[in-house]
Structures are given as C-alpha cells and as structure tokens.
Amino acid sequence: MIKEIRLANYKSIQELKIELGRVTVFIGENGCGKTNILEAIALSSAAASDKLDNEFLASRGIRVTEPQFMRSAFNIDNLNKEIKISLQFQPDKIIAYNLQHDGKPYSSWVSSILSNQDIPVKMPILSGYANLMYEDARNLKEIFSDEVYQGVLKVLLETDKDIFNLKSFLIFSPQNSRLRIFNEEGQIQPLGIEGEGLFKLLTVLNLEENKGKLQEIKEKMQLIDWFEDLTIPHNLSPAERVIQIKDKYLSSELDYFNQNSSNEGFLFLLFYFCLFISDDTPKFFAVDNIDASLNPRLGRRLIKELVELAKKYDRQVIFTTHNPAILDGLNLEDDEQRLFVIYRNKSGYTKARRISTPKPLEGQEPVRLSEAFLRGYIGGLPKNF
C-alpha cells in the first residue's frame, strides 16, 4: 500500500504531504482541492503506465486542461516547472514521477522516474551489458546516460507489485445515467470511471467459478430494505443488457423489473459492492463524492461495509464527501481508517490536516464526527458567509 504521498506544483497544490491509510476520507469546502489530490495520484498512475496522452488522462478521471493550468499558478515561474509526485510504499521504498510539458499545441506530458528503491535484479541491459546485478537503482545513474537509466528503471519496475497496483488507479465518479442504461465497457476495463462496463462485470461474476462473489454482493445489497434478489437472464440477445431485480414487497406473481425501473441508490450500491468484491477491479482507487444519491444513514452504513471489504480484499481507497453522515461510518481509533480536512490557506495553497476522534469535555457526552463537522469543530466549512 501507499503510505505517503508528496505532491508539488499541481493545480491548487503548491506543496503537500499526506500519510494515507487503507481507507482515507477527504472532507472540505467546494474548490479546496480534494479532487486535485486524487488527480495528482491518477497522473502518477498514468506516468507509471507511460500513457500520458489527454484521452488516457481523462479516462482515469483527470479534468484535463491547458498545460499551464495543470500546474500551480500561484507564481508565474511555476507555469514552466515540473509537476512532482512522490509515493512512499515502505520506509525504504520511494518512487517519484516528475512530469513536464513543452506547451506546444499537440504535445503530451512526459515523465521521468526517480527511485531510492533497492532492486535486486539480474537481467540483460539494453546497451549491451549482460547479466549484471544492480542492487541499488540509484547506482544506475552513475553507469548509464539519463535516457538509458530511465529505460532500465522502467523495465525494473514492470514486475513491481506496488507499481502494478498504482497503474490501475482510477477516480470513480459513477453517474446514474451510465449505470441505468448499462453502457458498454469503455477504454478502461472492467469498470469505467462513470460506471461503464457494470453489466459485463455482473455477467463475469455470474459465471460458476464466481458465484460466491455474486452471492456476497447480493447479501450486501440487503442494505436496501426492499431488495430480495437479482438475476441475469440466460436468453438475452448479444445487444441486450438487462438484469432482473426482485422487490420482496411485490406479489410473487409479478415479474422481476430491470435496472431502468430501479432507484439510483440501488444502482450506486451495486456498483460499489462490485467494485470492492470483484477480483478484476483495481486494488487502489478513489471514489469522488461517495455520498452521491445516498440517504445519510445508508451512506454511514455503506462506509462501514466498504471498510470491511477493503480489509478483506486488500484494497486501498480514498473517498471524498460533503455529507457529514459519511464520517460516522469511520472508526478513527483504527489507524487504517483516516480522515483529513482539506482546505486552502491564506495564500490559496491546498493543505491537509488529519482529524482524530474528538475528545469530549469533562462530564459531556462524546460528539459524533458528523456533529463536530457541522459545528465547525474540525474545519472544512465555508467561513465567508
């Protein structure tokens, strides 16, 4: 898992360090930089995959704009500087990506990699050296030119498990329309950032070898009071994308209804449980506005369920939210669950402050995180009105 991220010169982020948990939640005002943090991580994911063209950036959930606006604009000199993203996986393992753009109309971002990681490897090197042992990636710079060093380092990191998980990082922001009409899978599979591909993933989960996963999803969907069952018809034409949903309150003589007749809260829950339970979805990802379309109490319970699934299936996830009830689903006594208030300081820079469980005053009842948030005790609320 990623233990710490350091970001510099990205949009509203001049310089920022955050220590992540297994489940990390960001709260804060609109426009404070929550999504910018997610985008910077997605940018490092694109750099690790060597896919920095705009269409690949957008498909990861990055709001792509002109190169000068991708950089921090607090100082005019920053508009030509590199975007820097450093990820610490272990105390002795740090991978950093520096990204630059020449500003030309049809150019793409280019990245360079820095690493302090000890990488024992025995491999033939492209420049003609054969079967040499490199125990420290930093020493490669002393042996090769920068161009060859970058090529070798990329090859070395191809088999790195942490980098593999980073490459699949996406910012999910499911959309009701996408979930309801069951769009075909898009450029990113199995699930696109707006929910594309959900039907195909359900059909994969419906295969005999995955039936246990689908059954677990159905059990989790019991959070919806009226839900009884869902099935995938066997007689669908290749162009049909329909699931059958059973409402336990309706007459047993009535047919199942499909996703077009379902409420959007049901569809969002179905998406989240598939995302966390499937073996084919990313190990590291973010969900922007996890509270979208959810009743506050359902949102609180959902977070508790997703925390347990993250532990069970070894996921690392970042949520953003504006709903105070989401915070009550966290247990901040568990160090794997972390809450940060994201805010902009007097200079406009995006900053982060970790929040601990509020300590009650002597003789008073403990205050819930949602109440502490709404009362302004932990920050993250507008102050200009």
Image (cartoon, rainbow, N blue to C red):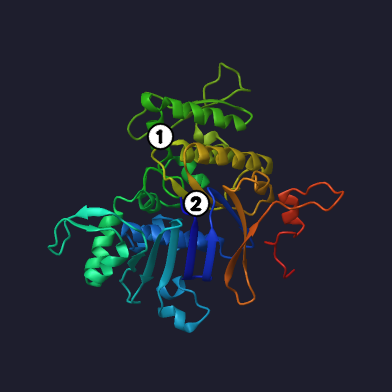
Contact between marks 2 and 1 (CB within 8 A): the answer is no
What label does residue 241 carry, if any? 1
Judge from the rendering whether residue 67 lies leftward or rightward of residue 356; answer left or right: left
Q: Which residue is mark 2?
A: 286
Decide if residue 65 is in sight here: no
Residue shown at the point (52%, 71%) measured from the top left = 15
Residue 173 lies left or right of residue 188; in this view the side is right
Establish if 9 lies above or below 271. Answer: below
- Secondary structure under tag 2 reads strand
Task: Check the picture and name the quadrant holding the C terminus.
Answer: bottom right
x then y, percent, for residue 318: 53, 52
The residue sitting at 75% across, 51% down in the picture is: 371
Expressed as whole percent of the image width and height from the top left, the position of residue 271 reads 50, 40
Q: Quadrant of residue 98?
A: bottom left
In this rendering, the label closer to the viewer, 2 or 1: 2
Q: Residue furthest top?
A: 253
- Identify which amino acid the numbered label 2 is placed on: Ala
Query: Which residue type does callout 1 highlight?
Result: Arg
Residue 208, percent from left and from top: 37, 23
Q: Is residue 365 above or below residue 69?
A: above
Identify which residue is drawn at 44% across, 60% down. Answer: 87
Q: Residues within 10 Å of mark 1 (few under 14, many from 20)?
A: some
Query: Could you tell me if residue 204 is visible in this image?
Result: yes
Asked if residue 37 lies left or right of residue 232, the reply is right
The residue sitting at the left extreme is 128
Report which quarter residue 251 is drawn in. Answer: top right
Q: Secondary structure at mark 1?
A: loop
Please report whichever mark, 2 or 1, sits nearer to the chain's N-terminal start. 1
